[in-house]
Image (tube, rainbow, N blue to C red):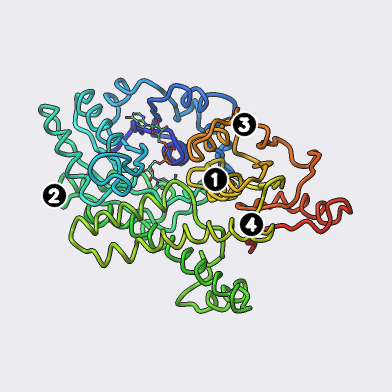
């Protein structure tokens, strides 16, 4: 089966970049990215310097493919009807209420997609799980699709996304692997082949792994858990280094030089952030508990506990430096995104660290190169549970760092961006500010 028309529900950090790259690499396929949020679609169709997602290289890809075979639209019904293949790339946050609240994945957006697909489909479809989902979700999706349609065959594939924000376009161009899970039936294998053929336009065949659906669903959760576990492992050792005089950078190098371990994800940090690691591990923990594997659940839960410990330890170090009292102190917070080269601040350690310092009495001046003022304000209001307007005397968000006139007591860097280097050099050599400490975990 040759696919000519694809749509993707969800135009976020995954749907936008992945579909842009498919469209770029497959000019013979029409790719339409859909979203329930009209503002987001408007921004995807707007100027290239204000796309909803910031990723190095993304604007160039969108520039080439948009209007040729890449489209962004609110017409969910019409595009579902026309597509032969439908990707679901909607958000799957941690549940906040009901059974499994605080741990299990909230599947309401995925279920809404399935209802829409069932409602608007008039012919057979291949439906692809691009979102990260608990193992065996395909069963639930199939159930919704079959119960809400007649005489239409839906084939469900799992094709989890492994891109990392900040390097998404390079990751998509040169994936370590593409994973496709499908049913072992003949129609399942035909659907797998149709998706393999799309990726084969730019990914070599040996990097396209095909598995059963459940392995593919679980492999994504397990991959994120293993990555986060490395961060928590090295961060736990950074605490021990500080007690013993060992140097965490020297330790990382010594450990990572062992080819069985390797150097990646061994840099100490203020902790991991982003929308995925915490929610995916919690989801894994919930699944383990559900299947009665309490010891396994506890093992993975500790990866998150160490992450919380590390964020708190960083903030506490600043508080201790000032003798436990931050009243009247002004702290410059550099970096709000959860990592360099993205405008995504979901679960960013900066949110936690700044809240801790602010609640301990400090006034904060905040700067990030890509996270908008509005996003920073909404993070503050959502996570610190304060009204920005009522606290704005003690909170200043900068949109320019180089020219800012700063009178500060210290700098805290939850997320390092290379562009801070120049500023920090100036800061350290300026006689007026000399001797003010810079708190960071730099690699
Ligand atoms: P996002 O929040 O950036 O985007 C999701 C989009 O889906 C939003 O724009 C929302 O308006 C839209 N949406 C939700 N329900 C809808 C519906 N019923 N109809 C139409 N549009 C709807 O989320 P993001 O970060 O792109 O993540 C999507 C999935 O991909 C999640 O499961 C996540 O775990 C997974 N993932 C995320 C990665 C990342 O780095 N952000 C990497 C790999 C996987």
Q: Which residue is mark 3?
A: 49
According to the picture, the residue beneath numbered tag 2 turns out to be 185
Lower sequence index among marks 1 and 3 = 3
Question: For numbered disc 2, what is the local secondary structure?
Answer: loop
Query: Disc 2 or disc 1, which is closer to the eye?
Result: 1
Is residue 171 positioned above or below 131 on the image?
A: below
Nearer the viewer's eye, disc 3 or disc 4? Answer: 4
- Distance in Å between CA atoms under marks 1 and 4: 20 Å
The residue mark sitting in front, 2 or 4, is 4
- Which residue is under mark 1? 351
Disc 3 residue: CB within 8 Å of ligand 1: no
196 or 157: nearer the eye? Answer: 157
In the rendered structure, the answer to whether residue 142 lies left or right of residue 303 reads: left
Residue hosting label 4: 324
Whole-Å distance between the Cαs marked 2 and 4?
Answer: 64 Å
Q: Name the N-terminal-most of marks 2 and 4.
A: 2
Viewer-side label of 3, 2 = 3
Say few, some or many: other residues with alpha carbon within 10 Å of mark 4 (under 14 / 14 to 19 / 20 or more).
few
Q: Residues within 10 Å of mark 1 (few under 14, many from 20)?
A: many
- Residue pictured at 32% horizontal, 37% vertical: 88
Distance, label 2 to label 1, CA atoms, is 47 Å
Query: Does mark 1's beta carbon lie closer than 8 Å to ligand 1?
Result: no
Disc 3 is placed on an element classified as helix
In space, the residues marked 3 and 2 are separated at their CA atoms by: 46 Å
């Amino acid at each position: 089966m040759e696919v000519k028309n694809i749509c993707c529900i969800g135009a976020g950090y995954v749907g936008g970049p992945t579909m842009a790259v498919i469209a770029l690499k497959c000019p013979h396929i029409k790719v339409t990215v859909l979203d329930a949020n009209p503002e987001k679609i408007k921004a995807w169709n707007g100027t290239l310097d204000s796309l909803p997602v910031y990723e190095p290289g993304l604007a160039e890809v969108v520039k080439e493919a948009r209007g040729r075979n890449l489209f962004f639209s609110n017409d969910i019904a019409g595009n579902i009807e026309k597509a032969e293949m439908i990707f679901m790339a909607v958000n799957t946050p941690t549940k906040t209420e009901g059974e499994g609240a605080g741990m299990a994945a909230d599947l309401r957006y995925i279920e809404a997609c399935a209802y829409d697909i069932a409602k608007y489909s008039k012919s057979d479809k291949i439906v692809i799980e691009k979102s990260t989902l608990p193992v065996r979700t395909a069963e639930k999706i199939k159930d919704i699709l079959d119960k809400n349609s007649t005489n239409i065959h839906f084939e469900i594939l799992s094709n989890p996304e492994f891109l990392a924000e900040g390097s998404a376009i390079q990751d998509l161009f040169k994936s370590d692997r593409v994973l496709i899970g499908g049913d072992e039936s003949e129609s399942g294998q035909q659907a797998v082949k149709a998706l393999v053929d799309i990726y084969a336009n730019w990914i070599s065949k040996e990097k396209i792994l095909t598995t059963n659906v459940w392995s593919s669903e679980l492999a994504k959760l397990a991959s994120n858990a293993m990555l986060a576990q490395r961060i928590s492992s090295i961060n736990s050792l950074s605490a021990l280094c500080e007690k013993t005089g060992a140097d965490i950078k020297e330790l990382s190098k010594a450990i990572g030089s062992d080819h069985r371990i390797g150097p990646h994800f061994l840099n100490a940090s203020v902790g991991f952030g982003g929308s995925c690691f915490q929610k995916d591990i919690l989801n894994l923990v919930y699944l383990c508990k559900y299947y009665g594997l309490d010891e396994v659940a506890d093992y993975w839960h500790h990866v998150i506990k160490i992450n919380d410990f590390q964020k708190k330890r960083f903030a506490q170090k600043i508080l201790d430096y000032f003798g436990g009292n931050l009243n009247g102190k002004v702290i410059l917070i550099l970096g709000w995104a959860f990592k360099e080269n993205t405008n995504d601040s979901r679960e960013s350690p900066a949110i936690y660290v700044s809240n801790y310092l602010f609640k301990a009495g400090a006034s904060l001046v905040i700067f990030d190169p890509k996270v908008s003022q509005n996003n920073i304000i909404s993070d503050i209001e959502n996570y610190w549970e304060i009204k920005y307007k009522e606290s704005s005397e003690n909170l200043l968000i900068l949109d320019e760092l180089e020219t800012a006139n700063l009178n500060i007591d210290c700098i805290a860097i939850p997320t390092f961006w290379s562009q801070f280097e120049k500023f920090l050099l100036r800061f350290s050599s300026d006689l007026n500010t000399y001797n003010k400490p810079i708190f960071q975990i730099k690699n």
